[in-house]
Structures are given as structure tokens and as C-alpha cells.
Image: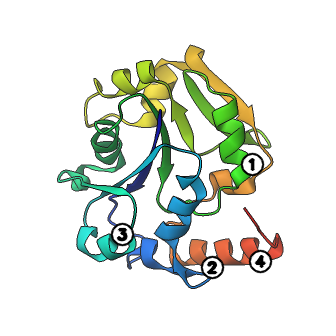
Amino acid sequence: MVTGIVLAGGLSSRAKVNKLLLKVDSKPLISLTIDSIKNFVDEVVVVTGRYDEELRPHLKDVKVVYNKDYELGMFSSVLTGLREVKDEALLLPGDMANISNATIKTILDNKGCISIPTYKGTRGHPLFLNKEMVNLVLKEDVNSNLRAFISKHEDKVNLVKVNDPFIEFDIDTIEDYNMFLAKRKELSYES
């Protein structure tokens, strides 16, 4: 059983607005992110934080978990989400809305202990963790992060080549959002 974890607990401090509610094709960014994985996982868990109340009306047919420690950073949301996982996990930041169906399928068809998509040699998201790795992440200190965890377990990493530039495209600022819209249009993107 694979649980999709969408990380939506951040502060959006660089964007100065709740970036997960920015519109793409008349839908909020968070909805596109959820849509990108929902048909490939057994359950979607969205981890909220600062913008919990604003996001909830847009979080239909998913399990919503509030991270009370969201101010400690993204890893606190990772831990909050992984506590809901019974078996395997697919982790995706809420601002990575254009991951293709082919990418999700390729990652899940090539599961390892830790599977990470790569595009032109650059690692990205979503990140797959098997049950053993989920349990090991849950033993990490809240002040750690996924990069440090992966470094400790590099021998367990399965790099999966995909043809998807969006695996490395997160939205931190309004400029990023505008670049995202332009790139999406340029590629006439269809997931």
C-alpha cells in the first residue's frame, strides 16, 4: 500500500501569499499537486500548517493532518505525514504541481528502498520510501531533513531517470510562479 504525502505546511514566506492557492488553469496549485498523484496511490494525506483553515476547503477526498510544529520547517511536516503511513510512501511538496503521470508511474514501477527521480542528472520529487525507510525517517530528530537522511542511506538510493523537467521545479516566489506558468505553456504540458 502506497500513501501519497503532500507537504502543505509551509509558511510561503518568500511568496508573501499562500502560494498553494495560486491559480493554475483556474484551480489552486495544491489541487493540481494532489491530482498528479491521487490515481497512483492508495490514499493521499495532505499535511497542513500555517494555512490549514485556508487550504481545507480545497482538500476534498484526502486525509488532512495538521502539523502543529510547522514553524520548525518542512521536515516536521514530513514526520507528521509519515506517521500516517502503514507501508510505503510517496512524498511530494505541495508546490510541485506539474509532475507527469509518466513520472509517477515510472517511480512506482521502479521502487527501491529510496527511489528518487532524476532529470538530466538532477534529482527531484516525488520521493518514494519503502516501509523500512519510512520507519527509519520516523526515528530522525525533527531538526534533521530529508537530504541529510538520504545522505546517510545513499547506498539504498535508486535513481530513476525520467523525462520531466518539473521534478525539480518548486515555487517559492511569485517570480517562480510566473516562470512555472510560462514553462507549462511553452511545453503545452499535459500530465
Q: Which residue is mark 2?
A: 178
Query: Seen from this angle, which residue lies furthest top?
Result: 155
- Residue 166, given in percent of the width and then of the height, sits at 68, 57
Residue at the spot 26% in from the left edge and 60% down from the top edge: 49
Q: Which residue is mark 3?
A: 13
Q: CA distance from mark 4 to mark 3?
A: 26 Å
Residue at the spot 32% in from the left edge and 65% down from the top edge: 11
Count of labels in the image: 4
Q: Which mark is residue 185?
A: 4
Marks 4 and 2: which is nearer the front? 4
Q: CA distance from mark 2 to mark 3?
A: 17 Å
Q: Which mark is residue 102?
A: 1
**Badge 4 amino acid:** Lys
Residue 144 lies left or right of residue 2; in this view the side is left
> Which of the two discs, 1 and 2, labels the residue nearer the N terminus?
1
> Which of the two discs, 4 and 1, labels the residue nearer the N terminus?
1
Q: Disc 3 on helix, strand or loop? A: loop
Marks 1 and 3: which is nearer the front? 1
**Badge 3 amino acid:** Ser
**Circles 4, 2 touching at the beta carbon (< 8 Å):** no
